Image (cartoon, rainbow, N blue to C red):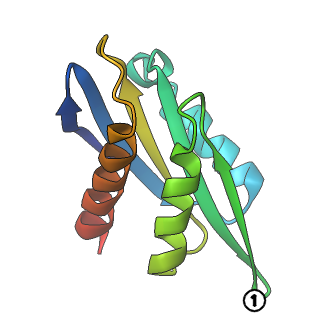
Amino acid sequence: MRIIENVLSDRGSKYAVSGGPAASREAAAAFLVELTRAKKFARATHNSWALLLDEDGRREGVKNDDGEAGAGAVILRMLEREGLVNHIVVVTRWYGGVKLGGDRFRRVTEAVRIYLAECG
């Protein structure tokens, strides 16, 4: 599990991005349980995530917005473009009191880019 804390901030909201191998829905669920064992992540406003599964050459996207409408789809599209399979990426947001509107998608995109760049 790789966690990059304090990766971004915008108008009081703070972001982290994390990820790791997950070759099934069950592995993704286990990853999320492990991540949220840390109280900081359990108390986050949103833990949006996506996973691109590759089962015998057939790809299936799995995502969850966790209340941050559309965030899971943004993460999934980026995983598809990169061809990163069987790897979960989670963008965590702690709400800072100001709604970000469409800028939230830019922040999610930026967080995933940073994660992908650091993980190669």
Q: Residue at x 23, y 65 (%)?
A: 118
The image quarter containing residue 59 is: bottom right
Q: Residues within 10 Å of mark 1 (few under 14, many from 20)?
A: few
Question: Is 53 on the left or on the right of 15, as rendered?
Answer: right
Question: Is 23 on the left or on the right of 103, as rendered?
Answer: right
Q: Which of the image's four quarters has the C terminus?
A: bottom left
Q: Which residue type does callout 1 highlight?
A: Gly
- Nearest the camera: 70 or 6? 70
Q: In x, y percent, where is residue 92?
A: 41, 34
Q: Residue furthest bottom?
A: 57
Q: Identify whether 26 is placed above or below 61.
A: above
- Nearest the camera: 99 or 23? 99
Q: Identify whether 103 is placed above or below 82.
A: above
Q: In x, y percent, where is residue 44?
A: 44, 20
Q: Residue furthest top?
A: 97
Numbered disc total = 1
Q: In x, y percent, where is residue 65?
A: 60, 39
Q: In x, y percent, where is residue 75?
A: 49, 56
Q: Pointer 1: what residue?
A: 57
Q: Residue at x 55, y 74 (%)?
A: 80
Q: Residue at x 30, y 62 (%)?
A: 113
The image quarter containing residue 96 is: top left
Residue 84 visible somewhere in the drawing: no
Residue 91 visible somewhere in the drawing: yes
Secondary element type, mark 1: loop
